């Protein structure tokens, strides 16, 4: 059974620096923030290169007034995970 990939986060949110996106998300990305919180979002391969900047913009929206930075990032390739599920 083939799993439908989620939409890229950039389709749902408005970020001035980045264009809207109609691509499926190939990556699930988890960010650990300097304030102890975590963010999770799905991104396409085109927006993945800007993942830290996108997370910092989102963190500024969620935690206004704080100087929140990304302290670590982990990526999960969704398409590869789908192939592994189908193979087993």
Image: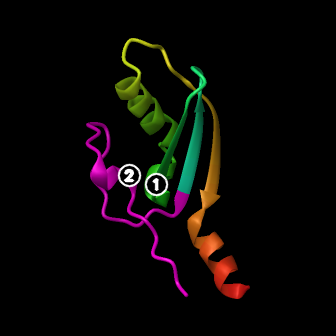
Compared across the picture, whether 46 is left or right of 71 comes to left
Question: Of helix, strand and loop, which mostly describes the magenta segment?
Answer: loop
Mark 1 Cα-neighbour bin, 10 Å: few <14, some 14–19, many ≥20? many
Mark 2 Cα-neighbour bin, 10 Å: few <14, some 14–19, many ≥20? many
Mark 2 vs mark 1: which is more N-terminal?
2
Residue 7 is drawn in which quadrant? bottom left
User: Which numbered disc covers residue 9?
Assistant: 2
Residue depicted at 51% across the width and 78% down the height: 3
Residue depicted at 52% across the width and 36% down the height: 52
* Residue highlighted by disc 1: 43
State the residue in front, 69 or 48: 69
* Circles 2 and 1 in contact, beta carbons < 8 Å: yes
Quote the CA–CA distance across marks 2 and 1: 6 Å
The magenta segment is: 1-27
Disc tally is: 2
Residue 6: % across, % down: 43, 65
Say if 50 sits above or below 22 in the image: above
Residue depicted at 38% across the width and 12% down the height: 65
Say if 87 sits above or below 12 in the image: below
Compared across the picture, whether 60 is left or right of 11 comes to right
Of helix, strand and loop, which one carries label 1? strand
């Amino acid at each position: 059974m083939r799993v439908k990939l989620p939409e890229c986060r950039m389709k749902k949110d408005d970020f001035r620096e980045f264009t809207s996106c109609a691509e499926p998300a190939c990556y699930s990305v988890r960010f650990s923030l300097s304030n102890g919180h975590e963010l999770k979002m799905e991104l396409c391969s085109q927006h993945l290169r800007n993942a830290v900047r996108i997370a910092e913009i989102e963190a500024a929206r969620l935690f206004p007034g704080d100087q929140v930075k990304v302290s670590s990032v982990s990526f999960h390739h969704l398409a590869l995970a789908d192939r592994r599920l189908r193979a087993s």
